[in-house]
Image (cartoon, rainbow, N blue to C red):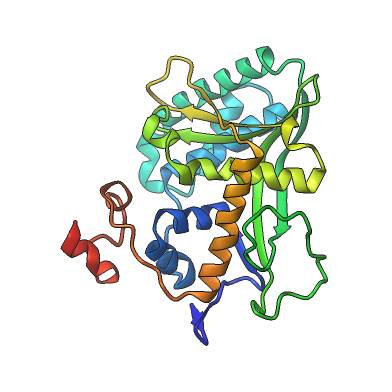
Amino acid sequence: MIVNGIPYHKEGDFRVSYSSYKKWLECKLKYRLDVIEDLDKFDGNIHTVFGTASHEFAQGMIAGERKLDLIDWRNHLEKHFNDLVSVDHLFEEWADQGFLIQESFHEYYETDWKDWQFSSYEFLLYEFIPHEYSGGVIDDRQEIDGHPNPNYMKTPIFKGFIDLVMIDPKGNHYLIDLKTATKPWNHWKTDDDAVMAQLKLYKYFYHQKTGVPLSKIKTWYYIMPRTGSVKYRQMIEVKSTPKIIEKEMDNLNFFFELVYNSKMYPPALTQSRCRFCDYKGTKHCEQSRIML
């Protein structure tokens, strides 16, 4: 909502996750409608429920909390599917595909990661952002009990979770984001700057929080496709130099400045961005009626 002309976020601080920031990168109008005006009523579907179950099970295997077991996997997935009464008939198909994904994940762990050290999963990134756009990576962080910039009246915060952190024998830290998908990612996905921004920002904030040099931090998407892949996995490395990360931080700082100070939220109006948008052709996005 807007209070006195200022975007007001639901939590006490100006707290932003990657998912909401991604909406802004993709379409500023959608960000305003979903995040600021809180019109997004999406509560999840079969894809998000399956994704959550798959994440939890894979993370549990890495942490030694679960074993690769068909019955355990099916029981785990069934608990998540209980909230989706309308998709009971799909359970068998999704359960079978999910177990193939877990088998592949376990195989990869036992071969490629066998000498690596498991560090953590759901690693919390919770960092204060510089309060004024400065055109560069800023290392100084505000104390939790510090005073926010009076121009903001709220403290800008970026919050996120890293799915898996692994450390190889050479001391390289691997930040691994797990993604379930219907099929392997294509070049449209890997060429999407908004998608790739996630791990670039996570790399920076992990560096800030742990002190690990950027050169020792590697970032990967581990894709878990249900179909279209013989191995039911796809590894995508996201390479980022300090200059690239600086650019991402510039964008994030710029986002905080514009969202706080600007009332301009233009729609993206591209076929790729608008194709599956719920606001396309509605009263909320009149421009799409005319231009698309």
| Nearest to the observer: residue 128 or residue 137 | 137
| Left or right of 291, for residue 158 | right
> Could you say where residue 223 lies in the image, as x and y percent from the top left?
51, 29
Please name the residue shown 26% across and 49% down the image. 271
| 31 vs 229: above or below | below
> Could you say where residue 53 lies in the image, as x and y percent from the top left?
56, 38
| 209 vs 282: above or below | above
Please name the residue shown 57% across and 32% down the image. 238
Picture quadrant where residue 155 is located? bottom right
Q: Is residue 150 visible?
A: yes
> Could you say where residue 186 lies in the image, as x and y percent from the top left?
38, 29
Q: Is residue 81 visible?
A: no
> Could you say where residue 177 lies in the image, as x and y percent from the top left?
60, 36
Picture quadrant where residue 148 is located? bottom right
Please name the residue shown 33% across and 62% down the image. 267
| Nearest to the observer: residue 265 or residue 186 | 265
